[in-house]
Structures are given as structure tokens and as C-alpha cells.
């Protein structure tokens, strides 16, 4: 069963919210987001239907990337945090932070991959 989930994505890599960028984000599936820029950071407030908060956020991140505007999601924040949604978002943010670190230093990729593998 799908539920509406409200969350904010903090996005880096966009220096201008011109028509081209907004149009690309809209066409990529971010038509359910309110987008604003403050202090050189872009914030996208979503209301997205999905079975879980995690699925809603992951699909929104995929849509931001699909826009091809150089945007990189650096953090997700639930609008109304429940204990369950806070745990889901915490896990997503851990992956986002690792991705940013790897992007800054690609030599860390093997270490990050090994840390994400289950312990046997």
C-alpha cells in the first residue's frame, strides 16, 4: 500500500536554478518537489507516494540524478520523523555520505565496498 511521504533532499552541484535546470528536474520526475536555493545549497521538498519512506527517498534521488544537471544529493531529512523513518533515513544518509567521500577520493571505493558487505 502506498503512503505519502514528506522529506527534504539537500542537493549540491547546482549553482543556478534557471529554467533549464528546473525543467530538467521536472521532466526527470521531480514534479512532486518544491525547489529552493539558500546559501548556495539547493533544497528539494518532496511529497512522494511509495510503500516506505526509504523507497520514496531512493526514487527521488534516482530522479534527481536522471535529470543530468550535475546535481548530487548529499542528505535526506524526513519532514515528520517517526522512529522508523528516522532509521531508514539514517541508513540512506550513511550511503550518501560514503558516496560523496568516494567521489572526492575514488581510491576509497574498495574500502567502502568492503565495509558495506555483510560480515560472514
Image (cartoon, helix red, strand yellow):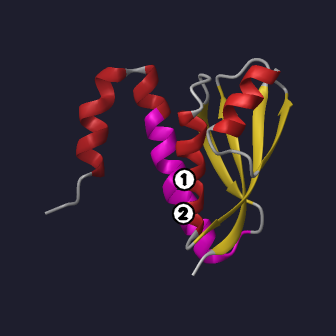
Residue 85 within the magenta-colored segment of the rendering: yes
Q: Position of residue 35 (x, y in %)?
A: 81, 39
Of 52 and 101, the residue lying toward us: 52
Quarter occupied by residue 57: bottom right
| Residue denoted by label 1 | 59
Which residue is drawn at the image coordinates 51% and 42% (left, top)? 96
| Residue denoted by label 2 | 54
Which residue is drawn at the image coordinates 69% and 67% (left, top)? 5
Which residue is drawn at the image coordinates 44% and 39% (left, top)? 98
Magenta range = 81-99
- In space, the residues marked 2 and 1 are separated at their CA atoms by 9 Å
Q: Is 106 left, or right, of 50 in this rendering?
A: left
State which quarter of the image contains the N terminus. bottom right
Vertical side of 107 occupied by 66: above or below = below
Q: Residue furthest front?
A: 27
The crowding category of the residue bearing disc 1, from other C-alpha atoms within 10 Å (few below 14, some 14 to 19, many at least 20), is: some
Q: Is 16 left, or right, of 60 in this rendering?
A: right
How many circles with numbers are drawn on the protein?
A: 2
Residue 21 within the magenta-colored segment of the rendering: no
Vertical side of 17 occupied by 8: above or below = below
Q: Earlier in the sequence, mark 2 or mark 1?
A: 2
Which residue is drawn at the image coordinates 23% and 59% (left, top)? 118
Is the stretch drawn in magenta largely helix, strand or loop? helix
Task: Give the SS element for disc 1.
Answer: helix
Quarter occupied by residue 40: top right
Q: Position of residue 103 (x, y in %)?
A: 44, 25
Amino acid at each position: 500500500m502506498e503512503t505519502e511521504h514528506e522529506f527534504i533532499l539537500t542537493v549540491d552541484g547546482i549553482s543556478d536554478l534557471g529554467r533549464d535546470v528546473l525543467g530538467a528536474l521536472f521532466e526527470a520526475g521531480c514534479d512532486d518537489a518544491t525547489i529552493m536555493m539558500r546559501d548556495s545549497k539547493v533544497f528539494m521538498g518532496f511529497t512522494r507516494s511509495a510503500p516506505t519512506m526509504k523507497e520514496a527517498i531512493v526514487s527521488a534521488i534516482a530522479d534527481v540524478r536522471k535529470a543530468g544537471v550535475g546535481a548530487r544529493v548529499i542528505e535526506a531529512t524526513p519532514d515528520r520523523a517517526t522512529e522508523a523513518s528516522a532509521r531508514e533515513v539514517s541508513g540512506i544518509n550513511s550511503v550518501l555520505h560514503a558516496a560523496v567521500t568516494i567521489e572526492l577520493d575514488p581510491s576509497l571505493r574498495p574500502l567502502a565496498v568492503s565495509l558495506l558487505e555483510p560480515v560472514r
